[in-house]
Image (spheres, rainbow, N blue to C red):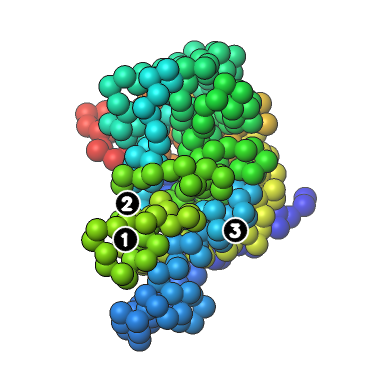
Amino acid sequence: MSTDPLLKWRPEFPILEKCTYLISNSLGAMPRAVYDSLASYADTWSTLGVGAWGKPFADNPTWWELNGAVGDKIAPLMGAPVGTVLVHQNASIANSILFSALDFSDIRRNKVVITDMDFPSDVYVLRQWLPEHMDMHMVKTHDGITIDTDELLDAIDDTTRLVSLSHVLFKSAYIMPAQEIVEKAHEVGAQVLLNGYHSIGIIPVDVTAMNVDFYIGGTLKWMCGGPGGVFMYVRPDLLSTLQPKVTGWFAHKQPFAFDIEHFDLREDAYRLMNGTPGIASLYAIQPGVDVLNQIGVDAIRAKSMRQTRRLIDLADELGYEVVSPRDDAARAGTVTVAPPNTYEVSRELIERGIIIDYREGAGIRIAPHFYNSDAEIEHTLYTIRDILEDGSWRQYQKSRDFVT
């Protein structure tokens, strides 16, 4: 039997010693190096104090430059040029900045195309920013797994201002046909924003080759960077066209002029910055990104396709519904299964130290990453069988946790 070379990384993730961690689609495992990274943050603060904003320390640049420096580490994982990726606090803030910068005044282009499989928070923010004359056109799923490509492309027409979609659907892990979407949108004069939370770090992404206009992702999940690490890419030729209303002094060409009368936006990615960032998270992000850059996404993708295929085969063997694409090429890193009593089974799995999550209307999401073994996958599916057979799921019938 061949060995799995990626399992050599397991000792670098402490939580793997404590449980079966199959939830990297929600929160990636913390790299052990984060302890040192956060210690470096504390050392910088305690040594330089306010001087850290303008003076490098150890292996990190100045705090003023850190959002861009971390973005440059992320850039190779998405095929972005150096200097085009900037880190923000969370996706709602990044979306708000971008939507505030777009011009929606042309009443002839009054359509924004979305789907009913997008992450709701993205739609919440978009809805609040659209002027009254704008219409959100929602393309709906027919199977709870995919979006019909022809229906989606037909919805993108010469009245479309923006197409705002998830690159990978969070419930099913279906990979949207991003290249076709971008090409159709550009053909009719529309722009495209893709949410890459469920793509970067688990499938190859090349925003340059895709020619996508805007791409927002996060380190929270497959990138093992923890919360507070959202990143935004803007196609370089579009930066000068953006006039953000959500902004702050970090976006100013001369912030230390403290000129209250004049606000001159920077011409680089910092044009879309706002106020003072949370520095600690910028330190915590880096070890996970470093690991992914060392491994390479192609190797991660190859293992993911094999392991998720094994998950589907086991679910079929045990008679559980699969709510993810069966086509390996159309599936990202998660397999959603829906055995009987799905919610209750999910709670008992967690109680037994198998960390997954449950999504209403879909099922139990199981998300192996490069550090997971094949044995953990088999253990998880057979434990579902055991829970259903021994009836331990029944104790969760009367109440539901707020966080699932």
Cα separation, mark 2 vs mark 1, equals: 7 Å
In the depicted structure, whether residue 360 falls above or below residue 219: above
> Is residue 10 at least partly visible in the picture?
no
Q: Which residue is mark 3?
A: 82
Foreground of the two, 375 or 27: 27
Q: Residue 35 location in percent, x, y? A: 43, 72
Cα separation, mark 1 vs mark 3, equals: 23 Å
Report the mark closest to the observer, 1 or 3: 1
CB-based contact (under 8 Å), mark 1 and mark 3: no
Q: Residue at x 31, y 44 (%)?
A: 245
Q: Residue at x 39, y 55 (%)?
A: 265
Residue 260 falls in image quadrant: bottom left
- At label 1, which amino acid type do we have? Trp
Question: Horizontal placement of 194 versus 123: left or right?
Answer: right
Foreground of the two, 281 or 266: 266
Q: Which residue is mark 1?
A: 249
Q: Residue 36 location in percent, x, y? A: 45, 75
Q: Earlier in the sequence, mark 1 or mark 3?
A: 3
Foreground of the two, 322 or 159: 159
Per the image, label 3 sits on a secondary structure element best described as: loop
- Which circle marks residue 247 in the picture? 2
Q: Residue 88 location in percent, x, y? A: 39, 54
- At label 3, which amino acid type do we have? Val
In the depicted structure, whether residue 375 falls above or below residue 357: below
Cα separation, mark 2 vs mark 3, equals: 22 Å
Per the image, label 1 sits on a secondary structure element best described as: helix
